[in-house]
Image (spheres, helix red, strand yellow):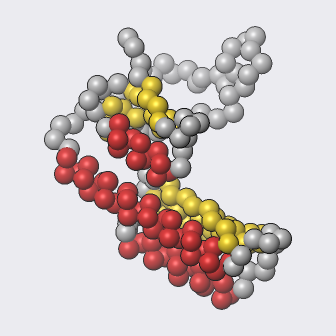
Amino acid sequence: MQVNITARHLDLTPALASYVRKKVERCERYFDHLVWAQVILTVEKYRQVAEIVIHAAKMTFRSKEESIDLYAAIDLALDKIDKQLKKHKEISKSNRKAKASKISKLSMPDTGKIPSLKSDENSKHMISEIKRFDVKPSTVSEALDEMELLGYKFYMFLNAQTSQINVVYKRDNGSFGLIEPEM
């Protein structure tokens, strides 16, 4: 796994870089297919911040922690990543055991046209990015787990029970919502 370390407002010593690499590489004990990690260490006036992002084959794990000691912030952030990796490993194990039927992959008809980034000619709104991803069948609880694991505010998935695209989201009051299409 490739580990990129960025230091902001501090000099990255070889000892600190070695400590970070050793700690981050221990995450490979959960998954063999971790691709790369980005570690951003920031020193501000009275706090030290460690932000860690680890990219796996189809997943991203991230954590950001702060402390008065940089080494403590690194340890806290890595503990959070460890919990995420353990949780994902348990979820994927249970999913493999529970899969009894396969749902055919959704496909969009290929029109051959590249979509315009502007929504229409008279609109002042501009789409700056288009994301494409594989939609995998899962239950609502699995989608909520995945959303929390990634730290997202919403998560789109293919509902295994209804075979429809659904969205789960976190509400302002801390509860969760589910968007189901009506056809």
Give how far across and how far down residue 86 sits, in percent: 38, 64
Give how far across and how far down residue 43 sits, in percent: 77, 72
Q: Quadrant of residue 90?
A: bottom left
- The quarter of the image holding the C terminus is top left
Q: Is residue 132 visible?
A: no
Give how far across and how far down residue 134 sits, in percent: 41, 39
Give how far across and how far down residue 143 sits, in percent: 39, 41
Farthest residue to the front: give it.
173
Q: Residue at x 35, y 24 (%)?
A: 164
Q: Residue at x 66, y 89 (%)?
A: 15
Q: Residue at x 58, y 24 (%)?
A: 114
Farthest residue to the bottom: give it.
15
Q: Is residue 86 left or right of residue 62?
A: left
The answer to whether 164 is drawn above or below residue 121 in the figure is: below
Q: Quadrant of residue 63?
A: bottom right
Q: Is residue 175 left or right of residue 172?
A: left
The answer to whether 85 is drawn above or below residue 108 in the figure is: below
Q: Is residue 127 left or right of residue 78?
A: right
Q: Is residue 149 visible?
A: yes
The answer to whether 49 is drawn above or below residue 89 in the figure is: below
Q: Residue at x 50, y 70 (%)?
A: 79
- Number of marks: 0
The answer to whether 9 is drawn above or below residue 114 in the figure is: below
